[in-house]
Image: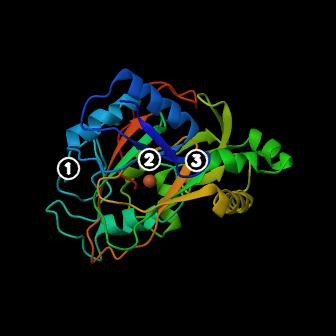
Amino acid sequence: MAISIYPVTAEFAAEIGDLDLSQPLESSELEAIRAAFARYAVLIFPAQELTVDQHLAFAANFGELERSIELQLGQRRPRTHEAIADVANLTTDGDIWRRDSRRRQYGMMGNRLWHTDSSFKAPAVYASLLYARSIPPVGGHTEFADMRAAYDALPAATKRRLETLRAEHSLVFSRQRIGFDGYTAEEKQALAPVVRPMVRVIPESGRKSLYIASHIGHIQGMPDDAAEALLQELFAHATQRQFVYTHRWRVGDLVMWDNRCTMHRGTDFDDLRWARDMQRATTSDTEGIFGERGAAAFAVTEY
Ligand SMILES: [Fe+2]
């Protein structure tokens, strides 16, 4: 049966129906999803019932799954499969985390910042596939910004200026923005900055896209205050309402986005009251629009 595609916005987000992701896909279905993903950078698959293995099997259609070595950040053991980035406010034992837990400060607060997943890793990330197992009754949405549309709308002079600029990305930088500096020397070494252009072409569509994130700490050849001013100007531009889609989660939603040309952030919810069990499978851009071919990088749950 052919899949159904219902645009949510004209060129950015679409719902996909008539598809059971717990089953292996036919090649025609996969081709249709790939074509939709090249046009819409955010795809929503509602009402899915997936085991962790089924979630990972679907994700593997879109590249190599991130390797499972994760900075554990004080966790005794992963709560779920080690290839899953655990974007939940739950402890290993399934309880809601405590107010003062390190993961809460490190993860949830960082998730409030606009970012693209894992821009600080080489190779970078292609697709994130986030699956909602339980959600709070209010709040806890995810906002997505279309960085292709944001690029298109930039003044010509800004486009020329950005063409040659390269930025340094590290998880350490984005966590410093929220006052978290609790990394060990070993963790900081594992999170050494990666240098990336600020504009790239997305091969499937040929569209240019801004590539910025709160993970940026420096822009090469610029004083840090000037770099920060430029970054804040670009964030304000790129997250204007016309470029943003807000996803209000339903249990069973699997939302997949292209990290090469989007930013996202989580919105507030009462995380000490409601469980929000979201699990992410992530594939690496091993074909490398940044010219970084090779094995997938280690996985870091950075929300
Ligand atoms: Fe994220």
Upstream in sequence: badge 3 or badge 2: 3
Of badges 3 and 2, the one in the foreground is 3
Q: Is residue 242 left or right of residue 34?
A: right
**What residue would you read off at disc 2?**
191
Q: Which residue type carries mark 2?
A: Leu
Of badges 3 and 1, the one in the foreground is 3
> Residue 296: x, y in percent?
39, 32
Q: Quadrant of the C terminus?
A: bottom left
Q: Quadrant of the N terminus?
A: top left
**What is the spatial separation of the Cα atoms under label 2 and label 1, in whole angstroms?**
23 Å
Which residue lies at the image location 48% right of the left edge and 35% below the top edge?
Answer: 122
Which residue lies at the image location 46% right of the left edge and 68% below the top edge?
Answer: 267
Q: Are marks 3 and 2 in contact (CB under 8 Å)?
A: no
Q: Determine if residue 235 is in view.
A: no
- Secondary structure category for the residue under label 2: loop
Q: Which residue type carries mark 1?
A: Thr
Q: Which residue type carries mark 3?
A: Phe
